[in-house]
Amino acid sequence: MQVITAAQAAALVRDGDTILIGGSGSGHAVPEALIEAVESRFLESFEPRALTTIHPVGLGNRGSAGAARFGHEGLLKRAVCGTVVDAPSVAELARQGKAEVYTLPQGALSQLVREIAAGRPGLVSHVGLHTFVDPRQEGGKQSAACSEDLVELIELKGREWLFYKPFDIDVAFLRGTTADEDGNVSMEDEPIFGEMLSMAQATRRCGGLVIVQVKRLAKRGMLPGKTVKIPGMLVDAVVVDPDQMQTYQTAFDPSYAGQLKIPFGSFPKLPLDERKIVARRCAMELSVGAVCNIGSGICTGIGLVAAEEGLLDHVVLTNEQGLIGGAPASGLDAGAARNYWAMIDQPYQFDFYDGGGLDVAFLSAVEIDPQGSVNISRFAGRVVGIGGFVNISQNARKMVFGGTFTAGGLSVEARDGTLTILTEGKHRKFVQTLEQVTYNGAYGRERGQTTVFVTERAVFRTGPNGLELFEIAPGIDLERDVLSHMAFRPAIADDLKVMDPRLFDDRPMGLEAELPGAWPVHARLAAAHR
């Protein structure tokens, strides 16, 4: 193992290389110094060129950091990732057809890295069937420049599956906290583990270079063996960045690192606006012992509502990055968590999700059609991608989609248990036809999945014939404030109810005392104690 500079690491990247990059979202264990060094070299010398970048999670701060540093014409040939919403320059190359951009399920890419490490032929999964990832639709392609099919439809034992093809890896850019003189790397300050170990193993199997960015060096033998996440036998070079931040926004939060737990009262409190109303109504779908996923966007507020309502010890909130328990972080720090019970590698979290381990999941929705299908991946001229959305939405027993009723300038006032629309959003979300199918409502119903759609003024569910309205906010006019802003007329429940007035009052709702259910007991254990 050698200790080198970021510039020296960038000089090892050759034209046409495939770079596998660890980390998540807005700086969570992202090797930013290495990525920045490649961009700087290209801007100075126009080298390297025609790179392929692969990262299961979107990387960036929705500005110029992370994967956005590869968003220069000539530097990037192809990007394969979960989402590009965090990297606007890459999304723009996709929109213009100047780079090949594929957005595939985050879990599929995460698990595929592990398959490559083991030398298996690729990943076989049901995840993505009947969505835009399915090659019968678009195969995950987000650019007219895409020249290869990365996903195939196959049949195995009488069932349809998707086959995700493997790839060769020339260089891996990974991140940890401390490296010793033998290249052993620990991740004690990182907010996630991701799939750093699998990435290092896969790159080694492909004969590629493994380069790890860390914050500090330690003497040989000083790292306890149990703390080593990437063994030195897999590491070729280490780059030290003493100014490495925990995320792009947070220098260091010990609760993100799992070094302490904070009191419920120390969690940020959301203002009472349309986003908190949605998060509160979503939280009413929780039950004692429920294992849940909290997605990005508006649904990240559910963790803060759960903390405010004292629910965190009664449910199991998780996120796809591998955090279990506690409260997933909100805003750009989404992907981290506070007060979590466990942190596991991302591929194993997706194994659990794909196997149906989630009782209920909460995800955002941008477009909804009459059948209860959802689009979040491409709309209004924007290329976004999917992250873990497809893994989660296709496999949870119950899906709760959250979002404001309209978008673009919406302003509401919640006071004394009623809701008033001050300014209506410019863009409809309930549309006749989706630009891309990210969640297939008919496929969900076929598999017996329960689906609920929560907005600040109305709540829907999917019935046998599609979307049905079953709750409306107090103070809202059905025709004026709901139906007139939909491109189709949903079914309306015979017992149309008024949403709970407590949703529209700034005081805590008292949900802890009302949480239904009890901690589950395995049937075999229950029988043994009867």
Image: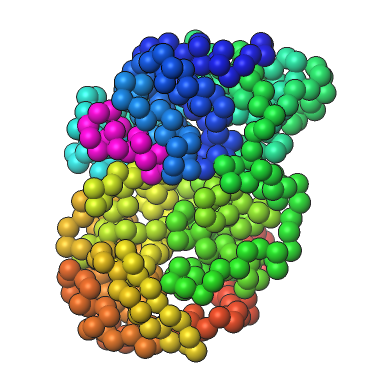
Q: Is residue 149 left or right of residue 224?
A: left
**What's drawn in magenta, residue-wise?**
85-101
| Residue 452 at least partly seen | no
Residue 91: in magenta span: yes
x and y percent of residue 15 in the render?
A: 38, 12
Residue 110: in magenta span: no
Q: How many marks?
A: 0
Q: Residue furthest front?
A: 44
Residue 228 against residue 350 in the figure, above or below: above
Which residue lies at the image location 38% right of the left edge and 83% below the top edge?
420
x and y percent of residue 467 in the render?
A: 25, 69
Which residue lies at the image location 67% right of the left edge and 23% below the top edge?
240
x and y percent of residue 428 in the render?
A: 24, 65
x and y percent of residue 263 in the render?
A: 74, 63
| Residue 219 at least partly seen | yes
Residue 433 against residue 425 in the figure, above or below: above
Q: Is residue 397 left or right of residue 347?
A: left
Which residue lies at the image location 75% right of the left edge and 22% below the top edge?
217
Q: Nearer the viewer, residue 501 or 122?
A: 501
Colouring method of the image: rainbow
Which of the image's four quarters has the N terminus? top right
Which of the image's four quarters has the C terminus? bottom right
Which residue lies at the image location 66% right of the left edge and 27% below the top edge?
241
Q: Tell me which corner region of the image, top left, top right, bottom left or bottom right, holds residue 419.
A: bottom left
Q: Nearer the viewer, residue 423 or 310?
A: 423
Q: Is residue 371 left or right of residue 357?
A: left
